[in-house]
Amino acid sequence: LLILDQTLLPHEVREIALATTGEVAEAIRSLRIRGAPAIGIAAAYGLVVAAGAVGRGASPAERLAAVRDAHDLLLATRPTAVNLRHALRRTLAAAAPGPDLAALLLAEARALHEEDRLSCERMAHLALRHVRDGGTYLTHCNAGALATGGIGTALGVFHLAAGRGFRLRVYADETRPLLQGARLTAWELAQSGVAVTLLCDSAAASVLAAGRVEAVFVGADRIAANGDVANKVGTWPLSLAAREAKVPFFVVAPWSTFDLSLPSGRDIPIEERSPGEVLSFAGRRTAAPGADAANPAFDVTPAALVTAIVTERGIIAPVTPATVAALASG
Ligand code: MRU
């Protein structure tokens, strides 16, 4: 499985080959590949890797057991993005013991990948009504092509608009502590010809309050049945600042990001990452000796602070349990 190693971007554009499920799991855990839809797609291909990596003498039942073990290993890599669980379940459901096991898994993984690509296109077209030539917008983390199987979710609309000749400026939060905004979003948008202005995460509120932004666009890692949205930590404070400044706050996410089994965002598991990501910078400890760090990777934005959720099925606005349920059944 070839992936672009996102930890090396933007200074080095290097593909790496993952030959075992353990390597795929490590790549997801260490954010070599990241973003909710992208980790789901990578994990689906990870099951194909598992089927191929079993020794030649293995029986069909042993091969299937190896794929099931891979499913469990990959599912445990990152707890918040529900796309991972959906992709793994769906790909495993396509498995049947026999000589075609790897081919069946590969066909399902490719179908999932292609569906995500099409979802991104559709969401970007739907979100385009909220973007104008000459407009200035704000985003957080990276919800772009790097994070999906297509042109991205929140960034997809900017790529599409730029392709149509719109002149846009996007404020990108640098996204502490791992700098997905500074390293990845800025890299991606610059390639589409979008003017990018980086902001320290803590500067976003004052930029919004100053009236310099027309709308905020972010992605999501899991959306509960009541429309509460888990996304990269810092999204919730951003939504509060947007509400205060009366700036529309849009979430762009495919249907694979919804988890209707959870009544509210309170039930969404939040990944706690290593304190080292906060205590150090570029591999060197920056914090004073003796300091500890908390490192939640995500937070939950209440539905009431979200102006609309753009999905490939349509736009949810206002965001309430009833409007989410209506799109689910529609
Ligand atoms: O920890 P990351 O980099 O995987 O977090 C990614 C995000 O929070 C994105 O906003 C989200 O996955 C949306 S992906 C289109």
Image (cartoon, rainbow, N blue to C red):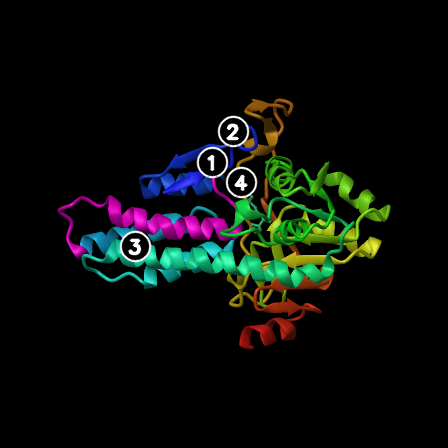
Side of 164 where 327 appears, left or right: left
Whether pointer 3 and pointer 4 mark residues with C-beta atoms closer than 8 Å, the reply is no
Q: Earlier in the sequence, mark 2 or mark 4?
A: 2
Query: Which amino acid, by three-letter code, is at mark 1?
Result: Asp
Secondary element at image label 4: loop
Marks 1 and 4, how far apart at CA: 19 Å
Marks 3 and 1, how far apart at CA: 26 Å
The label on residue 68 is: 3
Q: Name the residue under label 1.
A: 5
Marks 3 and 4, how far apart at CA: 26 Å
Q: Tell us which disc is closer to us: 2 or 1.
A: 2
Whether pointer 2 and pointer 1 mark residues with C-beta atoms closer than 8 Å, the reply is yes
Query: Which amino acid, by three-letter code, is at mark 2?
Result: Glu
Q: Name the residue under label 2.
A: 12
Q: Foreground residue, 294 or 237?
A: 237
Indicate yes or no: mark 1 CB to ligand 1 under 8 Å: no
Indicate yes or no: mark 3 CB to ligand 1 under 8 Å: no
Residue found 21% across the figure and 60% down from its top: 97
Q: In this view, does 57 lie above or below 14?
A: below
Query: Which amino acid, by three-letter code, is at mark 4?
Result: Arg
Count residues near mark 4 (Cα–Cα under 10 Å), then give few for <14, some for 14-19, many for 20+: some
Q: Which of marks 3 and 1 is nearer the N terminus?
A: 1
Query: Which amino acid, by three-letter code, is at mark 3?
Result: Arg
Quarter-of-image position of residue 124: bottom right
Span of residues in magenta? 32-60
